[in-house]
């Protein structure tokens, strides 16, 4: 378990600070399979997970959904045959908060526990 995945999401207010470039460089090392990407002008974390079929992809999607509900923080989910694309960013600040790194690490744990 990484340091990040052991943490809980904290309430993210609209005036919470986005992670700085320096913080991003440190945090991303703990979740090396995730790619920071700007989409629609918003910095996000993305990872594509591969599966053998649609059923397994859907099961993983639902487990990530359960984790997101527990954390009160919600990802973008695109479930396709054999593939789930997960995207984390914080809507309230239109960018990346520590919560997104925590939830990315928790997503890795959900996948690793399958
Ligand atoms: C009211 C509720 O707590 C907020 O809308 C939460 C819910 N889930 C969320 N998820 C994400 N990814 N970003 C948010 O800003 C966010 N806000």
Image: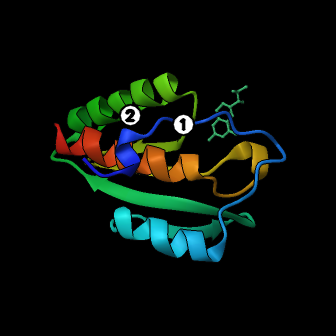
- In the image, residue 67 sits, relative to residue 54, either above or below, namely above
Q: Which residue is mark 1?
A: 9
Up/down of 75 relative to 65, above or below = below
Ligand 1 neighbours mark 1 (CB distance < 8 Å): no
- Residue toward you, 105 or 111: 105
Query: Which residue corresponds to the image point at 23% horizontal and 32% vertical from the top-left?
Result: 55
**Residue at 30% of width from left, 53% of height from top?**
49
Mark 1 secondary-structure assignment: loop
Q: In front: 90, or 65? A: 90
Q: In the image, what residue occupies the spot 41% across and 24% down?
A: 66
Dot placed on the residue nearer the N-terminal end, 1 or 2: 1
Q: On the image, which quarter does residue 92 sit in?
A: top right
- Answer above or below: position of 19 versus 85: below
CA separation, marks 1 and 2? 14 Å
Q: Nearer the viewer, residue 58 or 93?
A: 93
Residue 14 appears left or right of 104: right
Examine the image and state in which quarter residue 48 appears.
bottom left
Q: Position of residue 85 (x, y in %)?
A: 42, 52
- Please say if 4 is above or below 69: below
Residue tagged by mark 2?
Answer: 64
Q: Mark number for residue 101?
A: none
Secondary structure of residue under mark 2: helix
């Amino acid at each position: 378990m990484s340091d990040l995945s052991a943490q809980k999401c904290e309430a993210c207010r609209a005036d919470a600070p986005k992670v700085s470039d320096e913080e991003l460089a440190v945090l991303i090392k703990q979740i090396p399979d995730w790619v920071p990407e700007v989409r629609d002008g918003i910095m996000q974390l993305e990872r594509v997970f591969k599966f053998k079929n649609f059923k397994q992809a859907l099961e993983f999607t639902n487990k990530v959904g359960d984790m997101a509900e527990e954390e009160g923080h919600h990802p973008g989910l695109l479930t396709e045959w054999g593939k789930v694309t997960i995207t984390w960013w914080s809507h309230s600040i239109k960018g990346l908060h520590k919560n997104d790194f925590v939830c990315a690490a928790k997503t890795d744990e959900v996948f690793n526990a399958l």
